[in-house]
Amino acid sequence: MAGAAQAQIDDIEKPRRLPPLRVLAVQALIVAAIAGIAWFLIATTLSNLNARGITTGFAFLRTPLAQPINHSWLTFTPGVDTYGRALFIGFLNTLTVSAVVIVLSTILGTAIGLSRLSGNWLLSRTAGAYVEATRNVPVLVQLVFWYQLLLQLPPPRGALDLGAGVFVSNRGIRVPTVLLDGHVWLALAAGIAAAIVLPPLLRRAGLSRSGGMWTLRLLLVVVPPLAAIWLTGAAPALDWPHLQGLNFRGGAALTPELSALVIGLTAYTSAFIAEIVRAGIQGVPVGQWDAARSLGLHRGTTVRKVVMPQALRIIVPPLASEYLGVTKNSSLAVAVGYPDIVALVNVAISDTGQAIEGIVIIMLAFLTISLAVSAFMNWYNRRVALVSR
């Protein structure tokens, strides 16, 4: 054993030799070939564009767009605001759809996955039927189905009144909104950021007590907005929807396009997440269930405290792939008329002819979202990974 250990130490301390000249030459040729192919493709493309009188570059982003955008988190004035602002709005819309669908599909998929493992025959079979029916129908067909179904709802004058200021019609869902001063929103954002960052730092410093972190998080989220309201005197107000003419005014609107997209993608993705959750739970050894049962733990407590923490190590890697699939499937928004980044880039391409630049913008947008999701899931995977001692 001592000789083997000494041999390992000698191997570590032995200076590394450079690869042979032949290996370096082959690698240099491969790099040169890739660079040559890239140069040929770029030069040929630019030559063909110049021959057809098509200009290149991103100067079109400063040109005003005359077409209105039917769903925007930012103000957009047709004929005044530029293509650049429109594409940024499309990026925000894509980000919104991806975030909402990821959250909703995770909650629904987890519930369905647990239902498939239930001892209740009807519940488990119903969950299984949902999974098989949903994941075997193309997602594009589901989006069109939900969109057409939402369009069959009554018009605004005959809208369904769900109470509390919520109205459902073929123009979408209208809900009351809270009007807050900009300083209050800024204080709320700062409080949420502090609630995310501060507790882990206190835990590492050994200054936290068990059970007190959730109270601290709640205070960090609630106190800054209340302080901002008290200092600015801008009390929050409710903006209630009301029927005016042929449509509702006031409140916030969830358009049929966005509703169909969220419902369709959530239903489709949750079926796959349900199978991931079911497989992760079944991957936990049966002895863990038996040990928890011998301690007298309830089944719900066993799942929450014993099984799920171990199952997460199996669930998280494939779950990351599903989240990345959500961001890419959101590009199907063009099928229901929702103005995401793909739809607005298509408008820019048809108006300006800048096809290559538009495709590059789409690629960069989805690459940014996908890398952000991947980085977060990799961080969470490392956090729940099994640490060997």
Image (spheres, grey):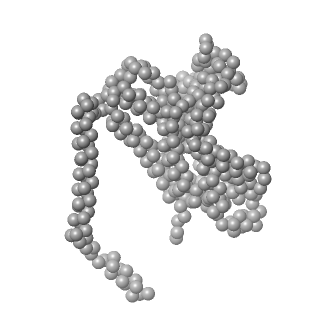
Vertical placement of 171 versus 355: above or below? above
Residue 193 falls left or right of residue 236? left
- The residue furthest top is 245
Image coordinates of residue 225 in percent, x first then y, are 54, 32
Nearest the eye: 225 or 373: 373
Image coordinates of residue 333 in percent, x first then y, are 51, 34
**Rendered residue at 71%/26% (across/down):** 162
Image coordinates of residue 374 in percent, x first then y, are 47, 50
Nearest the eye: 320 or 208: 320
Numbered label tally: 0
Residue 56 falls left or right of residue 71? left
Q: Determine which quarter of the picture holds residue 256.
A: top right
Q: Is residue 350 visible?
A: yes
**Rendered residue at 55%/52% (across/down):** 319
Q: Determine which quarter of the picture holds residue 215.
A: top right
Residue 246 falls left or right of residue 89? right
Vertical placement of 282 versus 246: above or below? below
Work out which quarter of the rendered image holds the N terminus and state it.
Answer: bottom left
Vertical placement of 195 versus 334: above or below? below
Q: Determine which quarter of the picture holds residue 286.
A: bottom right
Q: Is residue 190 visible?
A: no
**Rendered residue at 64%/18% (across/down):** 156
Nearest the eye: 47 or 104: 47
Image coordinates of residue 57 in percent, x first then y, are 28, 33
